[in-house]
Amino acid sequence: MLERKDPIDSLLDLGIRAGRLDSTMSHPERNETYERLRARQLKLLYVSPERLLIEGFLEFLKERGISSVKTKALAEREGFDFYNKWQLI
């Protein structure tokens, strides 16, 4: 999996309200990101492809005002199987 921590740290250093959700995070780190999402404190969120497949996750994002997901890079990196799953979402 592509590491997302460094780009997020760089964005935070620039004052951009960014976060991430991926499998490298500890439970407390994930909870903090979810709390920031609930409070609508994030403008940009990096999400691992597998998290997009969790039932209810996309609806959760939509309810928090996050409505755009970049899919081309995900499809290229994860391969055609992921792209087929994404089409079902």
Image (tube, helix red, strand yellow):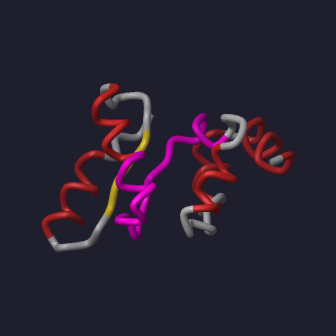
> Does residue 29 sit above or below 68 in this rendering?
above
In what quadrant of the picture does the N terminus appear? top left
Q: Position of residue 32 (x, y in %)?
A: 31, 43
Report whether 87 appears left or right of 25: right
Report whether 37 appears left or right of 69: left
Which residue is at the far front?
39
> Does residue 26 sit above or below 33 in this rendering?
above
- Name the residue: 63% across, 44% down: 57
- Name the residue: 77% across, 35% down: 81
Which residue is at the far left?
13
Q: Position of residue 88 (x, y in %)?
A: 86, 46
Q: Viewer-proximal residue, 19 or 60?
A: 60
Q: Position of residue 55 (x, y in %)?
A: 72, 36
Report whether 44 appears left or right of 11: right
> Does residue 38 sit above or below 12 in this rendering?
above
How many numbered badges does the structure rendering display? 0
Q: Position of residue 9 (x, y in %)?
A: 20, 55
Which residue is at the far right?
88
Q: Is residue 15 magenta?
A: no
- Name the residue: 16% across, 73% down: 14
- Name the residue: 24% across, 66% down: 11
Instruction: Find residue 15 and report its image quarter.
Output: bottom left
The residues colored magenta run: 34-52
Instruction: Find residue 28 and report its image quarter.
Output: top left
Q: Viewer-proximal residue, 19 or 6?
A: 19
Q: Is residue 43 magenta?
A: yes
Report whether 56 appears left or right of 77: right
